[in-house]
Amino acid sequence: MASKTVEDVLFPGIDVRVEGMSDSSGILVVEAVSTASPGRCPNCRKQARRVHSTYQRTLDERPFGSRRVIIRLRVRRYFCDRRSCSRTTFVEQVPGLSARYRRSSTGLAGWLRSIAVELGGRPAARLCHRLRLTAGRTRLLRLLTAPVVPDRAPRVLGVDEFAFRKGCTYGTVLVDVEAGRVVDVLPDRTSETFAAWLTDHPGAEIICRDRATAYTKAVREAAPHALEVADRWHLLQNLSAAVEKTCHQHRDCMRKRAEEEPATEVPELPPVLLPPAELPRTQIIERTRHRYEDIHRLLEKRWTISAIARRLNLDRKTVRRFRDTDLDELLASARERRPNGVLEPFKAYLNARFTEAQGQVSGTRLFLEVQARGYRGSRQVVRKHLAALRAGTAEPVRADVPSPRKITSWIMRPRETLTKSQDERLFQVRLACPDITRACDLAWAFADLVRHQRGYLLLEWIRQAEQDAPKPMKGFAGFLRQDLDAVTAGLTLPWSSGVVEGHVNRVKTLKRAMYGRASFELLRIRILTQPATPLQWASGGEEG
């Protein structure tokens, strides 16, 4: 095996000759001379023939072991012999080692740029310090440059919004769905900005979007021949919202059926009068009382709904509800919003034992009894409930009614993934309310259209929903009819916004990593230069 020279170890494939090395204070200084052939003029590209002079450049190089490396490179200055060229002399650049106006080697600059792309400013500077690389955050950020946006839009373009500040300002990310990479980032989500981009970058044949009307308007203005494809995930999300609203509206049906069912496993006990029930002084009940008093005090002073909303920092719908609803009804609603805890299934037994013992029973004994029956909570929770029974502020035992959100999750999931108990409880819910049953059947039918891409059956589904469905489902069907072509394409073609949603997740990660200190230009550069592959950024959740 042939022995390697110093040049082969330090500068493999680079035309330099090492003339000396010195090591002092952990810094390795390498004296080198360029041995490359005469370079070309950077203006006219004519190859040089005459040497004007030589001088020494100092370059930082990648560390060697634990030592910082500095290269003192002697290069040549050449004459440009072309009379028509405005440049008289120029300095040669060693390929793979030096570049104009750079005080670091090409390899080190590549390292620093990769670190800046991944980490940004301050985190990248901290990592460079640990790696013995001399680079501050300003220098690192200066290495980031946005790639050139292609003149033509990709054939399959994905568009979605992301939040600079949620609820206030938004931007738009444009993605090449086929390649799985970000094409451009826009500073807002208005139809005018997106339409101007489509005009300047023609060529999009398919545009994947969510249900936002601003993007639809821009596509119709600037790319009328492009096929719009509604995202399937957003369609299922909208369907889920309609199902949950239906369950909210018919929650009384489920509660009524649960209360009509005979109680089981409750022993026959002698009647004992408990203390009169009072509303527990919980935070939500006290807040409801104070809010009701504040709103009605301002109403007596003839304040308007909008003025009260601004004064109390409330939504106008909330102010109007407190104006038109009795206090007792508001308190009852606030009381029902208290979440079911781990003790809820055992309250009937605890109340019965409390009544049987005439209130003369210890919390520890009741805790051991319910623990033997499967209770997994703490002893303190049982003692608090026992104290509420003695004070007369305990809530009555409520019927075990699943929440609308839980019912919606059972309906929207594939039926084969439900457990036996979940399937039985969903069956009881369907028996309790025919409107929820109808919404459930329609949701299952629509989910089947989405999963098996049966867009040709969409119009028939809309007709059925508009005939006898609950009001929220009718509203959902009406929205589908207004965007019929895009929804049909979404349920027929394989294209969707899954890749776009994945990039939105990445944008949120980059945005939060910069702690809100960066400008839009820097965020755009990091989004466009961040390496990503379609497999790395698979479909993700919606913007938050």
Image (cartoon, rainbow, N blue to C red):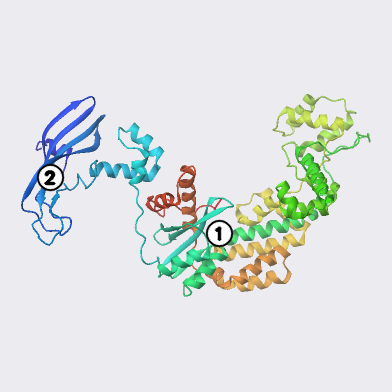
Q: From the viewer's perspective, is residue 281 above or below residue 155?
A: above
Q: Position of residue 183 (x, y in %)?
A: 40, 59
User: Disc 2 marks which residue?
Assistant: 15
User: Disc 1 marks which residue?
Assistant: 233
Q: Position of residue 213 (x, y in %)?
A: 57, 66
Looking at this view, name the residue that lies furthest to the bottom.
225
Q: Secondary structure at mark 2?
A: loop
Q: Which of the pair 313/353 is nearer the observer?
A: 313
Name which residue lies at 53% across and 55% down.
170
Q: Position of residue 211 (x, y in %)?
A: 57, 63
Name which residue lies at 79% across and 39% down.
286
In which quadrant is the N terminus drawn?
top left
Q: Which of the pair 421/357 is nearer the observer?
A: 357
Looking at this view, name the residue that lies furthest to the left.
50
Residue 484: quarter of image: bottom right
Q: Are marks 1 and 2 in contact (CB under 8 Å)?
A: no
Q: Residues within 10 Å of mark 1 (few under 14, many from 20)?
A: some
Count of numbered circles on the image: 2
122 with respect to 24 (left or right): right
Answer whether residue 9 is visible to the viewer in this image.
yes
Q: Amino acid at mark 2?
A: Asp
Q: Which of the pair 17/200 is nearer the observer?
A: 200
Q: From the viewer's perspective, is residue 177 above or below residue 532?
A: below
